[in-house]
Amino acid sequence: MDALEQANKVFLQNFPAETWFERAILFSWYCKIRNCKFCYMSTQPDKTAVRSKESLIAEAIICKNLGWEIGAFSGGIDAYSQANFKEIIKNVSKVCGKLWLNVGALGEKEIKEYLPYTKGVVASIEAINPKLHDFVCPSKPAAPYENMLDIAGKYNLKKAMTMILGLGETIEDFELLKDFIEKHKIDKIYFYSLNPQKGTIFESREMPSAEYQAEWIARTRIAFPKIEILAGIWLNKVDRVPLLLKAGANSISKFPALKAFGSKEAKAIEQSAKEAGRKFKGSLTKLPKINWKDEVEKLELDEILKEKVNKKLNSYLSMLTHT
């Protein structure tokens, strides 16, 4: 409790008493490597599955107008060609500005190509302990990600990293995380908890406790007062939101906000922000009264794509109003 109180105090000394929801926009359900031992994609066949341009743009419009931040533009490695991916992020950035890219370890050529549409890059480190990382992510070594972070600094891009708690690390590994953040000047960290997937070796593993997730967040907040911390939760874990916010998290993610919009869980999250002494920016429960067609019309897109975006947007809005 002393650490939580200290972390909350440090947070309030460096940030407004606010919080918000961040949504990762997933552009694919395909990954070239598909052997990270915790990942749902590792249980799937080698079959390309990517989303349409209109669905991605429509989702970005929803996020922008509900006050949700885009935590990352994310998907499996090599789901798109470089040219197609550039066109997609160009169009999505027309809606919500520059993006955090979580698309594998990018080289300098790719970073330069995507630079006009990129806010920062996300290194999917997952496990900070080197031996554990090599075991759970055998085809995703850390070195190329570290190189990407170094290149990002060269082009004044922000730098982020992910950690999935519950894979086998211990709190003693925090010193490894601290060294990594200092070495690469990390601006933002995503603390997720293991969500055991059927068909993986973690299928029967318990999700780590709220207190364990909060301890990692609190230690990070105290050690790095100005770092941005995102806390991942799940639909059945909204009760941990007040604790994670008091531990020093800036925002929350991993909540299925489209499917659970306006639900009791969504309402609980907004109430939890108040309990933690934070103002919740945006909404998980109420749609704004705006002309959605105008939101599409003002974008610099060709008319055929606009028509497709309108159709997809109406489909999403229908889902949100009937939840």
Image (cartoon, helix red, strand yellow):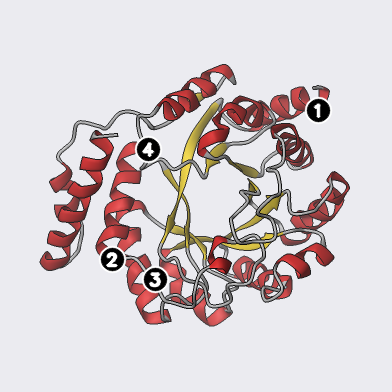
Disc with the residue nearer the chain's start (4 vs 1):
1
Disc number placed over residue 49 in the picture, else none: 3
Check whether the beta carbons of the residues at disc 3 and disc 2 lie within 8 A of each other. no
Disc with the residue nearer the chain's start (4 vs 3):
3
Residue behind mark 2: 53
Q: Where does the image place residue 48, in percent across and percent down from the top left?
A: 41, 76
Question: How dense is the environment of label 2, judged by Cα within 10 Å: few (below 14), some, or many (20 and up)?
Answer: some
Residue at image x 69%, y 60%?
201
Under mark 1, the amino acid is Ala
Under mark 2, the amino acid is Lys
Q: Dot 3: what SS?
A: loop
Disc number placed over residue 67 in the picture, else none: 4
Residue at image x 33%, y 37%?
66
Check whether the beta carbons of the residues at disc 2 and disc 1 lie within 8 A of each other. no
Q: Residue 174, relative to residue 156: is it above or below?
A: above
Rounded to the nearest angstrom, the CA distance separating label 4 from label 1 is 31 Å
The quarter in which the C terminus is drawn is top left
